[in-house]
Image (cartoon, rainbow, N blue to C red):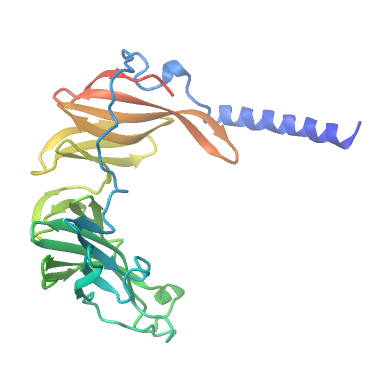
Amino acid sequence: MNRTFYFYSNSLLLMGILSWLISACGLSSPKENERYGFELPVDSTKAVWKNYLTTRSWHDSILLKNRLYLPRDEHKHRQLLSKQGIALIDQATQKVVWHTDFPVEKTVSAYDSAQHSYVTSSTLILENDRLFCAYLHVVPPQHRGTTDLDKNPKDRWEYIIMEASTGKIIRKEKMPDARNAYDFIIVGDYWFIQDTRHQTLSRYSPQTGACLWSFPTTVTLSTIANGTVSFLKRIDSQTWQTIVLELDTGKVLFNKRFEKLDKHVISALIYKDGTAYVEMGAQKGMHLELGTSYAYYTISFDTKTNKPLWRTPFS
């Protein structure tokens, strides 16, 4: 027998052992009739996932009536503006109408004189005659510490609110702590702050900087659609929370906890006309290199009763 045969035989044996171990350890995928919502009526005619915003939706620039509002930071729009800051450009003449520097202090690392502070992730929102700009201010360590972690730069969210016509700064603020404690979530024209220290998620006005409402938990934003914002929270490997809030007021429209959701994930949530749509994934396979694969489908819920109504076919 040649080496190829031995290699093939050993591979089959190893795959068989691994398959047995996966099954014995309870890691095998659920059968189709064990998937959440299997018994529900199936409907493939409704187009649910359309006309919504996600966390991938933000403004790198804003063009309105031949006026181009543009942020230039350490990484963004370096070819369009030579100087960092925010600018208004007349599209017809390509002339800069006004330019406002980021109001940040430039600092140097206590460890390396070549390492400077910088601004990145600048994002704009235009509301009436107010231009909001949020950005991350990354600051190198100012004092020598005792551990390697002390050498790491700190990133903190800051924002300014300007007169859109002149670039004059009306308000400027910086978060009291680093990004991992106070994180900005900006989706389209909507601005949220996630406060992990106080376990709150709040919506703020980009026109004034005022807090509009707060919700007492930290979550992952899924979608903004139809006057609502939807969130997911994975509590543990088998427990999920799905939440829909009214965008203007923060009023709870849907709040459902999924427990004992073994070998399932919840990947998205959207709301429309009194119905919440939950995108569910049921484990359908495991691969040593590629990881776990899922069969995705959508389940609709009546938000008044939290009861499921129907589902789409399994993918």
Locate residue 151: give its quadrant: bottom left
- Left or right side of 60 for 189: left
**Image height of 276 relative to 109, above or below:** above
- Which residue is at the front of the view, 313 or 179? 313
Name the quarter where the N terminus is drawn. top right
Name the quarter where the C terminus is drawn. top left
Expressed as whole percent of the image width and height from the top left, the position of residue 276 reads: 22, 28
How many numbered badges does the structure rendering display? 0
- Which residue is at the front of the view, 71 or 19? 71
**Image height of 150 relative to 292, above or below:** below
Expressed as whole percent of the image width and height from the top left, the position of residue 284 reads: 50, 27
Q: Residue at x 35, y 13 (%)?
A: 39
Expressed as whole percent of the image width and height from the top left, the position of residue 150 reads: 40, 76
**Image height of 184 relative to 145, above or below:** above
Expressed as whole percent of the image width and height from the top left, the position of residue 26 reads: 52, 29
Q: Residue at x 21, y 76 (%)?
A: 103
Q: Residue at x 37, y 17 (%)?
A: 38
- Left or right side of 103 for 115: right
| Residue 23 visible here | yes
Locate residue 49: give its quadrant: top left
| Residue 260 visible here | no
- Which residue is at the front of the view, 1 or 124? 124
Q: Residue at x 27, y 27 (%)?
A: 48
In the orientation shown, which residue stands out farthest toward the front? 93
**Image height of 131 relative to 1, above or below:** below
- Which residue is at the front of the view, 68 or 91? 91
